[in-house]
Image (tube, rainbow, N blue to C red):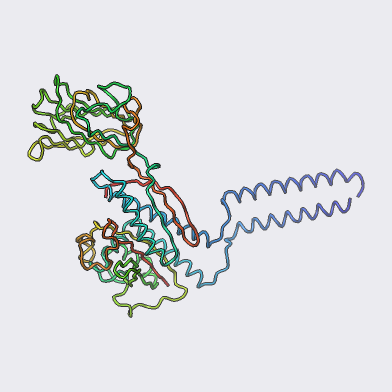
Amino acid sequence: MVARDRGQLLLIGGVAIAIVVFSTILFAHSLAVTDGITTTGSAQSIERLADREASVNRDLERLAAETRGDDLDGYEGRYRHALSNYTGTYNRVVGSRDGTYLNATLNETASLGTEVNQSGSSRFTRPGGTGSNVDWTVASDVRRVVVFNLTVKDIPGSGTPFTLVVEGDGGGTWTLEVTETTPGAVKHVTVNGGPSACADTGDAEVDVLDGTCSIGGPTGSTGTFTTFTSTLDAPYTVRIEKGNRVRGSYRFAAIGDFPGTSYDAGDTAPYPVVPAVDTTYDTPSASYNRTVFVEVNST
Amino acid sequence: MRGQAYTLEGVLAAIVVVTATVYGLSAVDTGPFQTGAEQRTAELDARAADLLSLAAETGALQNATRCYSVGAPTLNGNQTGSSTEFERMLNYTFDRQGDEYNIYLSYWDRDANDRTTVLVSQAANQNAADNPADAAVATETVTLTDDMPTRIGDCSGTGPTLSVVGDYFAPDARPDSIVYNVVEVRLVVW
């Protein structure tokens, strides 16, 4: 090879290196999109574990719904007890055959939801905070409500109605009014300015979520009304107006923001609207640890 | 200089071989070697697992489990007009393809303090074919709670709840809890 061929050799060398680099890039790209290399055996194990996870999650949801039911008091304890019995039975039936181990415990700290329960006050007043003691925001950016019950005993004073206002995502509002012209007179529950859903003397019990009301006990007046969840889109802002007029109590549990202008520390408490369950699932071939947020639907 | 030329030639040849291998591998489906029987077992395995998974997700498996022993003496798809959705799924997936299977339900027997297994695809154990060694096996669990109603009348109607019915095959494993029992459904196909 003579000196004049040197340039040709360098050219071929450059082309060769370019081809190597280009091929490497293409090859590396094809590996990246496969997201790893695995054997068919481990792929099957992972697929089966995914099925198991879905099955366990379904069980957690069912148990959450059945333990919650209509009785909200002590829900966390009942759910914890059900989880303990479920995992114990599961491990005896499934684990005794193939060595599977399941553990599921309620993680109250990670659970989503807050509760306001004003039950001990004769006044239907703002729990705390620094805002207006007449009109206040119960919660804003409310994405889900699981409890909203009111009991209005009487409205002393000038006959000004007590009003509950819910504002939806689009700015639309829903209002519920409880009126009583004079103490001891007939109370009326009306929604959006419509006719009275209930009218009688006595304590007014209102289930805001179910859209039912009753006044005067079993022999009194009962009725239904359109709920805010059926007419407005979440997130909601829930406000109370002229709350200081009312004697009674209310209970509200939801996922949302409970503003400091309405509450002091200790006025609200965690409530597992969406319970978080720490789950461990071990099999001889694969395992997972996860905190599962359980969507609770009615059974 | 001649040695350099040979090196380059070797590199180019290697590139051609590697490129051809990469393109060749992408053109064929690679995998571990399997005999025909192994391939059939793997295929049955996937079908059995998918059937149980789908039946569990749709609630068909739970309905069939709540029906066995109180609404139907057996659970299988080898009869015309099978009464539950799960049995229809079995019929479409296995019976019509000429595949055989056994179905077992395992539960916790509190009195015996042991796991108990029953064959539910046949009325009597002696009628069941032995599971061959290369049979495909799939399992799924069904969690039963006290308030779940049984299925009666050939599985078409709703009966009393599990906590009060007397002749259900599985006893209450946790009388002090809403959890009634956990039933493992095992499907063995060949």
Residue B81 position by quadrant? bottom left
Q: Residue at x 44, y 69 (%)?
A: B136
Residue A267 percent coordinates (x, y): 31, 32
Residue occupying image coordinates x 49% and y 60%: A45
Q: Quadrant of the C terminus of chain B?
A: bottom left
Residue at 19 percent across and 31 percent down: it is A248
Q: What's the residue at 44%, 72% (across, down)?
A: B135
On screen, residue A64 versus residue A218, left or right, reads right
Residue A189 position (above or below residue B85):
above
Relative vertical location of residue A131 with respect to residue A274 in this rendering, above or below: above
Identify the image quadrant of residue B27.
Answer: bottom right
Q: Is residue B104 placed above or below A63 in the rendered structure?
A: below
Q: Nearer the viewer, residue A269 or B120?
A: A269
Q: Residue A156 in the image: x percent, y percent?
A: 14, 23
**Is residue A86 rendered to the left or right of residue B41?**
left
Q: Is residue B119 left or right of residue B35?
A: left
The one of B169 and A196 positioned closer to us in this rendering: B169
| The one of A245 and A30 positioned closer to us in this rendering | A245
Q: How many marks?
A: 0
Q: Percent position (x, y) of residue A117?
A: 26, 35
Residue A146 spot, x, y in % from top left: 28, 40
Residue B13 lies, with reference to residue A170, above or below; the image says below
Instruction: Determine if residue A65 is in view.
Output: yes
Residue B81 visible, this angle: no
Residue B177: which quarter of the image? bottom left
Name the residue furthest right: A2
Residue sitting farthest toward the top: A158
